[in-house]
């Protein structure tokens, strides 16, 4: 069976969809299934290398992205058994072979703020129209499945739920020397050390986290929060300054996975207040690294974390500050959460997830 996967999205290799694609190719390779990548200038895929061995390229223009998804992908190789599009889109006509499309979330349809402009409305109306041409649709969580059932009930017979996976790098300890360099580079000197990894748009709810941390640090007279990628988000920087947290909050640029892995290992607690997710990959990564997790009690994230972490109403500042205090002041609880997290994360190993995809491929190709 020859499987072609659209890797046109692989640009800077730092988004969740890029990491999903990279992990799935790696997992399939580990269980003996080779993938032919299309949409990246014919480059060979190297599953054991970061970003599949692809050289980062400039972000595509919206026009080029639309052209590829509408016409370009149809001109791919002919000698294949199946096409997998690892993001929510399908061209205007069916492929001559079965096709699989991954739906990570329904943010454009659930949240008004994400489809207000005309070009976004046009793009997502095209998604709505042509996605049913896929042979099979994969939802990466039960939460996404329920969103599909609510908004697009006619799609449901084609939907299979297969959870996202966690890259193997998050299951491996970091060398002491690398940790020491990281701590020195970012001047990590205070404890407890809290970590947030994720985006900074409104649904990520980072402001609630900052307000809660202000209370925690004031009560403890110590502590710090690392916001990965926050250095490039102007409103977050301003809010840190407004709360007088500049000496307590470390804002980093976007970082490579190896550095992020080290930051997880250096953290005492991972905090994730997002109000809406299709899955919740950063909490899953933290679980794999053995970091205690406190996360917003939303459907997809609670599905990932289960009882291995603590779930808090996303926008309740008092609940956040009290829960953070509870964990940092109760070492036995933190240790119990870390152990449960590691066990839970095994469910998201890419070998396990890839085996589920292979069964799906085999079923629809027959």
Image: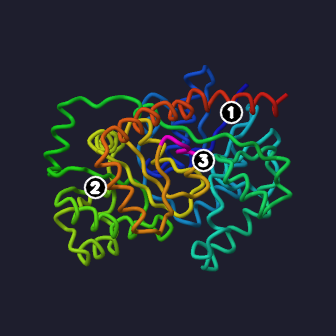
Who comes first in sequence, dot 1 or dot 2? 2
Q: Residue at x 34, y 58 (%)?
A: 229
Residue 267, position as x, y percentages in the image: 29, 45
Residue 196, position as x, y percentages in the image: 36, 55
Q: Is residue 92 left or right of residue 30?
A: right
Q: From mark 1 to mark 3, how far is it between C-alphas?
A: 20 Å
Q: Which mark is residue 303?
A: 3
* Callout 2 crowding tier (Cα within 10 Å): few <14, some 14–19, many ≥20: many
Residue tagged 1: 357
Who comes first in sequence, dot 1 or dot 3? 3
Q: Is residue 139 above or below residue 231?
A: above
* Callout 3 crowding tier (Cα within 10 Å): few <14, some 14–19, many ≥20: some
Which element type, helix, strand or loop, lies under badge 3?
helix
Residue tagged 2: 226
Q: Which residues are magenta?
A: 303-308
Q: Nearer the viewer, residue 258 or 206?
A: 206
Of circles 1 and 3, which is in front?
3
Q: Is residue 233 left or right of residue 1?
A: left
Q: Is residue 214 above or below residue 336?
A: below
Determine if the magenta segment contains residue 307: yes
Which element type, helix, strand or loop, lies under badge 1?
helix
Of circles 1 and 2, which is in front?
2
Q: Residue furthest top?
A: 32
Q: Quadrant of the C terminus?
A: top right
Of circles 3 and 2, which is in front?
3
Residue 65, position as x, y percentages in the image: 59, 60
Q: Are marks 3 and 2 in contact (CB under 8 Å)?
A: no
């Amino acid at each position: 069976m020859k499987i072609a996967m659209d890797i046109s999205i692989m640009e800077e290799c730092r988004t969740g969809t890029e990491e999903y694609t990279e992990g799935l190719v790696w997992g399939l390779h580990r269980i003996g299934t080779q993938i032919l990548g299309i949409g990246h200038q014919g480059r060979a895929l190297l599953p054991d290398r970061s970003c599949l061995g692809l050289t980062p390229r400039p972000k595509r223009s919206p026009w080029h992205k639309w052209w590829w998804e509408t016409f370009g992908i149809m001109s791919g190789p002919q000698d294949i058994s199946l096409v997998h599009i690892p993001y929510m889109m399908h061209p205007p006509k069916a492929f001559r072979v079965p096709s699989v499309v991954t739906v990570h979330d329904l943010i454009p349809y659930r949240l008004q703020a994400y489809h207000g402009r005309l070009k976004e409305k046009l793009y997502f109306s095209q998604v709505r129209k042509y996605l049913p041409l896929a042979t099979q649709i994969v939802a990466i969580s039960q939460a996404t499945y329920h969103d599909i059932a609510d908004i697009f009930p006619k799609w449901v017979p084609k939907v299979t739920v297969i959870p996202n996976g966690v890259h193997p790098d998050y299951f491996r300890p970091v060398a002491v020397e690398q940790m020491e360099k990281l701590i020195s580079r970012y001047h990590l000197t205070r404890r407890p050390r809290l970590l947030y990894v994720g985006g900074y748009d409104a649904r990520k709810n980072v402001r609630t986290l900052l307000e809660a941390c202000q209370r925690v640090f004031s009560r403890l007279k110590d502590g710090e929060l690392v916001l990965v990628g926050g250095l490039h988000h102007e409103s977050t920087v301003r809010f840190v300054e407004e709360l007088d947290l500049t000496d307590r909050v470390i804002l980093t640029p976007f970082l490579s996975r190896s550095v992020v892995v080290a930051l997880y290992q250096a953290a005492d607690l991972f905090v994730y207040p997002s109000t809406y997710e299709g899955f919740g990959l950063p909490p899953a990564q933290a679980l794999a690294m053995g970091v205690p997790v406190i996360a917003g009690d939303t459907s997809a994230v609670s599905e990932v974390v289960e009882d291995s972490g603590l779930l808090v109403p996303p926008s309740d500042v008092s609940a956040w500050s009290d829960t953070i205090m509870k964990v940092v002041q109760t070492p036995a609880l933190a240790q119990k959460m870390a152990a449960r997290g590691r066990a839970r994360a095994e469910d998201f190993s890419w070998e396990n997830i890839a085996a589920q995809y292979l069964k799906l491929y085999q079923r629809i190709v027959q």
